[in-house]
Amino acid sequence: MDNLNLSVNKREVTGKKVSELRSNGLTPIHMYGPEIESSPLQCDSKILDRVITDAGTNIPVTVNVDGGEQNNLCFIREVQYHPVTNKVLHVDFMKVQVEKSVRAQVPISVIGTSPAVRTMGGTLLQPLLTLTVEALPLEIPKTITLEAELLVDFETNFYVSDIEVDEGVNVINEASEMVASVVAPRVERIESEGEEGDETETEVAGEEAEESFGEDSSG
């Protein structure tokens, strides 16, 4: 992917008046970070929407301020959405230093179809959708990809320890944390539980019969 760039302008409008900006196709944003003063800015809403989609929170964006500082290396840190329309209301960009490590959430994608889904009717579950990593800004992975074909049965799972990352990228999650698994169809699980129940009942009945026989013999 090419480097993401975003051109922005300084913003004079603040408070409730920012609604006027949105009406004119502009979105208010803030840029902040260590050793810089928080800057109120504004940007074309359509361009910003595309950058949010492409960058997520783990791909750096070069922010250029018209009439101000250029080449600000930033990460998107917070996006506020309208609760009804889901339109972007406000975005926070965190400026980082290229030589200092940062933490980011990297999306995990399980691609393909598991044999346990295809031939055994199971359902793929992915409880962990992002991986927390720490690395230099330009070394943060764009995505983590796992092959569903490796989930060959209901006993095989993906854990954080199965994820390989490049040298210099540190994984923060616990190695034992589950990423994805395939669970058996509900009917099969019910039948399995029923069989276990039948076995338990048989064992109990057998034990009761033995106790009864022992009492009769002693009498």
Image: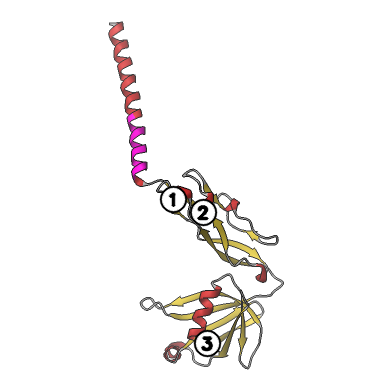
Q: Is residue 181 above or below residue 31?
A: above
For label 2, count other residues whose C-alpha is less than 10 Å away and answer few (under 14), some (14-19) or many (20+): many
Is any atom of residue 77 visible in this view? Answer: no
Q: Is residue 78 above or below residue 46?
A: above
**Labels 2 & 1 near each other (Cβ < 8 A):** yes
**Labels 3 & 2 near each other (Cβ < 8 A):** no
The question of residue 195 being in magenta is answered with yes
Q: Classify mark 1: helix, strand or loop.
A: helix
Q: CA distance from mark 3 to mark 2?
A: 40 Å
In the image, is 44 to the left or to the right of 61?
A: left
Residues shaded magenta: 187-198
Which quadrant of the structure image shows residue 197? top left
Q: Which residue is mark 1?
A: 117
Q: Amino acid at mark 3?
A: Cys
Depth check, mark 3 against mark 2: the one in front is 2
The first of marks 3 and 2 along the sequence is 3
Q: Residue furthest front?
A: 119
Image location of residue 93, percent across then percent down: 57, 78
Is any atom of residue 188 visible in this view? Answer: yes
Q: Which residue is mark 3?
A: 43
